[in-house]
Amino acid sequence: MSKTIKVALAGAGAFGIKHLDGIQNIDGVEVVSLIGREFTKTQEVANKYGIGHVTTELSESLALKEVDAVILCTPTQMHASQTLACLNAGKHVQVEIPLCDVYKEGQEVLRVQQQTGLVAMVGHTRRFNPSHQWVNHKIKAGEFNIQQMDVQTYFFRRTNMNALGQARSWTDHLLWHHAAHTVDLFAYQCGSPIVKANAVQGPIHPTLGIAMDMSIQLQTAHGAICTLSLSFNNDGPLGTYFRYIGDNGTYLARYDDLFTGKEEQIDVSQVAVSMNGIELQDREFFAAIREGREPNSSIAQVLPCYQVLHDLEQQLA
């Protein structure tokens, strides 16, 4: 595929804007349609990024013949059904994390993807962050083996707001959204499936209706373990921090920064063509379309993560 890849992006909120910023750095790709819940706000974003077509209906964008691919940055509960709509419309699709919050819906997405042969991937950004890529290269070179990962995912949340401080139309979730990043990354970095998983959660918030604190334990078939702590109650530094404890070293990954266990910073600026994990994720999506291949973080590759999340949900219930 040598022509410009024309993209529709659904979800003009905080994460959609991150994709729009990343795509501006990628040659041969043009966002031609923007879909949002509120037309006026969506039009404002479209004007800023020079996007010609604006709508509040995904189906309207899917009907555009010029659209080759879709990026979905919409509420969690829409992800599976909208991914299916894109595939059934003959469009390649990248859906933001999580693929689903009902496991059988994820299974159906995989079935349709395999039937159509279209490129479909999920935004498991940690696979693409340069800090985690650096560790992955060391593992693949046989220079490092994970014995344990210790991960903290911490936010402070009392109302249903997004990263821009705007009200969400949906409720975020520690298990299906935030734990999904670590569950997938742990298995991916270890190169081994998760065979044991346990979880406990704190009290359910009276208005948000979700647990605000959660603890998860994982073990791979190779024996490596992971301890994941998640909280919406943490009044301190926000984000996710990964400690890789290995057979011959310890590494701390904080977004795109990487340190040794002794807090010595490691230069990861040359790991990839960008330091922006979202941009690298999008580059992989478009490269897979051009090359007619399975992308890293494809539906098939990440679905085992959602099986684990489903099993944990059953435990918590």
Image (spheres, helix red, strand yellow):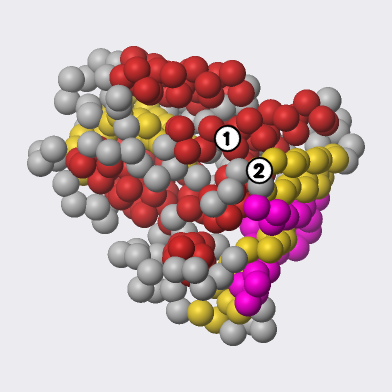
In this picture, which residue range is highlighted in magenta?
A: 222-251
Query: Which picture quadrant has residue 261?
Result: bottom right
- The answer to which of marks 2 and 1 sits earlier in the sequence is 2
| Three-letter code for the amino acid on which mark 1 is drawn | Pro
Question: Which residue is under mark 1?
Answer: 304
Name which residue lies at 81% across and 40% down. Answer: 199
Q: Is residue 307 above or below residue 267?
A: above
Residue 131 magenta-highlighted: no
Q: Residues within 10 Å of mark 1 (few under 14, many from 20)?
A: some
Depth check: give the residue in front, 108 or 202. Answer: 108
User: Which element carries disc 1, helix, strand or loop?
Assistant: helix
Q: In this view, does 220 lie to the left or right of 70?
A: right
| Three-letter code for the amino acid on which mark 2 is drawn | Ile
Determine if residue 208 is in view: no
User: Which element carries disc 2, helix, strand or loop?
Assistant: strand
Q: Is residue 253 left or right of residue 89?
A: right
Residue 233 magenta-highlighted: yes
Q: In this view, does 191 lie to the left or right of 38?
A: right
Residues tagged 2 and 1 counted as in contact (Cβ below 8 A): yes
Query: Which picture quadrant has residue 175?
Result: top right
Whole-percent x, y for residue 58 in the image: 37, 20
Query: Which picture quadrant has residue 53?
Result: top left
Whole-percent x, y for residue 141 in the image: 44, 68
Name which residue lies at 44% across and 73% down. Answer: 268
Name which residue lies at 55% across and 62% down. Answer: 255
Question: Which residue is under mark 2?
Answer: 194
Q: In this view, does 302 lie above or below 229?
A: above
Depth check: give the residue in front, 295 or 87. Answer: 295
